[in-house]
Image (spheres, rainbow, N blue to C red):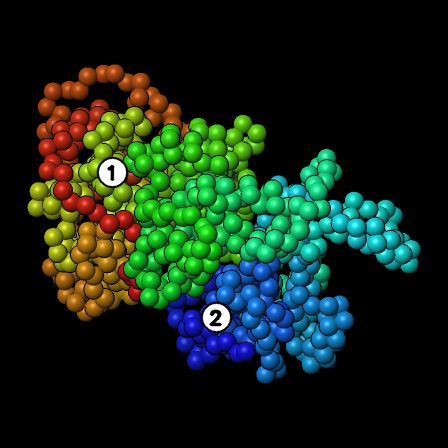
Amino acid sequence: EIMKPSTPHLGTGEIDEGFYSRQLYVLGHEAMHRMGTAEVLIAGMKGLGVEIAKNVILSGVKSVTVQDEGQAEWSDLSSQKGLTSSYSTASDNRSLKDLQNVVVLTDSSLDDQKRFGDFCHERGIRFIVADTRGLCGQLFCDFGEEFEVLDRDGEMPATLMIDRITKVPTPDADLLLNLVKELNSDSKLEELDEAAVRSFSYTARGDLAPMNAFFGGIAAQEVIKACSGKFTPLQQWLYFDALECLPEDGGCLEESSFSSVRTRYDAQIRVFGSEFQQKLLMQKYFLVGAGAIGCELLKNFALIGLGAGEEGHITVTDMDYIERSNLNRQFLFRSKDIGKPKSEVAAKAVARMNPQINITAHQNRLDPDSEGVYDYSFFMGLDGVAAALDNVEARVYLDKRCVLYQKPMLEGGTLGSKGHTLVVVPHLTESYGPAKTSSGNGIPLCTLKNFPHRIEHTLQWARDQFEGLFKQTPENVNHFLRDPKFIERTLAHGDAEALEILGGVWSSLQETGAGGQRPQSWEDCVSWARCKWETLYNNDICQLLHCFPPAEVTASGLPFWSGTKRCPHPLRFDPNNTTHMEFVMAAANLYGQIYGIKGRRDVAAIRKTLEKVQVPAFSPKSSVKIHLTDKEMEEDRKKEADDTGKLASGAFDSFPPLNVIAPHPRLLSVSSADKARLAELKGKLSSLNGSGQMYPVDFEKVGRWVQ
């Protein structure tokens, strides 16, 4: 059966950038265009074949043909998300109709693999074999003698860790072991791992959703490589097993524990046994995040029966709503779901896969504000937690909660074609925590802000600017409006950070006419964007050059601006410069978004508005101190923290207006005047009326606001 993907395929030559935005970041336009002309045949529609088909269809190929001559069985329900019990006796016959660019064989015999492999090799058809048997699996790729890799830089996804699998006894083990010994006599191995052979024989009749998910992902990645020429293909065999999950003591259960009982979990019981299956059914789990990884986890949870017993339960929370760009990789969602809560739609989708599953959907952000919901009683009622989050801060917070309540946490993430998984068991394994999040290769803050010398520095600087302006500050405002103790908590971080945060909150809530930066119209947003351009690309540079002139020399007589210190040059705004105008348009749209003001993309109208904008004159200040190193900055910060001197009378008279954007507080020392300014901010914030919710923008979702 030839399946035309319901996703916007690329055969017309036009790429739907809204739909494929994340994939475009990884593959690029040329590779995506090549995929749009590819036709793929997938033979075998058991669990692994369905996983591969799902992934390949979402990737944007022209067409997918699926073929299968088998009958659907009860045991298929444990790994095949596309079946329900009503299909258990239906024919699943498929016919091959067209010659394809890529052929994938699953659930196939060795004879078929050889026969079709030779056929495809002779005709230049890219050929992939994928198969799983219980806890073991294999993958083989033959892309022909003339296949060209157009971009060889890519890494294979990380392996999946599976825990607690019961060993299965079977009388076939001795027969298989004898066969392997005979084969080994022809091509002698130094040492035959008899235990591995027996373990394989015990579990080979099983069909496990997690193993299929793992091999389905890798096989689909090989299909993408075959279609796009992007990344180096597998060379040439991959064997993977999770036999280490079997009991270490070698103990065996009764054979009756692994017999078929005509349930949807039969193929899993063949590996784990009925006792272990009952434990899965009774589990109570908390899943945080229902995005790409969250959807995959929920699908696997439903197939293995996690929380599907009378006492079992799954709670999933995600505060996000479905967007069009999600549909390319979050397969539980459809076009009709756009605008709906991710957690609710995902929960309903997996309930259709497995009607026995007990699942509750929440829309709460996981942070201190939700501790009234996810409290001691909630966590103590759990057996485990799964994290499918997209930011480090949330992972660290969840990790701390799991350590506090002594609950195991399963954590995973992806970045392009790379991925990681982590199992955290409190007091047994290392937690996610700060040790995992800190990097020895981090960019020093002073280098990032004042002395960048590599392209990575400029990219990180831009990302930090975005996060501070359009995400962190709006989130701080919302926390301030909801949390009566926000000011108290902020002051605990130190004066420098408190001054930055509270100053941003006040100016964001106060209207421009009253000294703040809260816009009332689209024109105000354009004015803010123009002034922000002047601050970043002229004023800050002029201040830096005032402190360190181009001809500055060090104490040793060497030029200050040398080596990794590159002398900057202030820019002059030009409304006819495309880059300058694109910055203003993007910044104005984003600024309007966080305040709920509808944006515009009419360059002519923006240019006309700019004619009326009054940009404040700037004069460099000699009192500003710019640190050369992070160590110097920390020493000054500590010194100021220990300073208990009293403020001079009349200090408030010399304060600059709050809407003047000064150099980043973390780069400057905290002066006595700053302490007085902080005291003033506390008083002004306490008198605000408590209205003015803002709408933070995530960097990964910014495309639709600036295009």
Residue 575 appears in which quarter of the rendering? bottom left
Instruction: State left or right for residue 128 relative to residue 175.
Output: left
What residue is shown with label 2?
Answer: 60
What residue is shown with label 1?
Answer: 479
Rendering coords of residue 135 (x, y %): 67, 51
Residue at 55% of width from left, 56% of height from top? 264
Q: Determine the residue located farthest toward the left in the rendered image.
A: 513
Residue closest to the eye, 621 or 612: 612
Rendering coords of residue 81 (x, y %): 51, 61
The numbered mark, 1 or 2, whose residue comes first in the sequence reads: 2
Q: Determine the residue located farthest toward the right in the rendered image.
A: 185
Residue at 26% of width from left, 35% of height from top? 500
Element at badge 2?
loop
Real-space Cα separation, disc 1 to disc 2, in angstroms: 40 Å
Instruction: State left or right for residue 46 relative to residue 600.
Output: right
Q: Is residue 426 above or below residue 95?
A: above
Rendering coords of residue 165 (x, y %): 64, 43
Q: Amino acid at mark 2?
A: Gly
Rendering coords of residue 42 (x, y %): 60, 71
Instruction: State left or right for residue 524 relative to residue 17.
Output: left
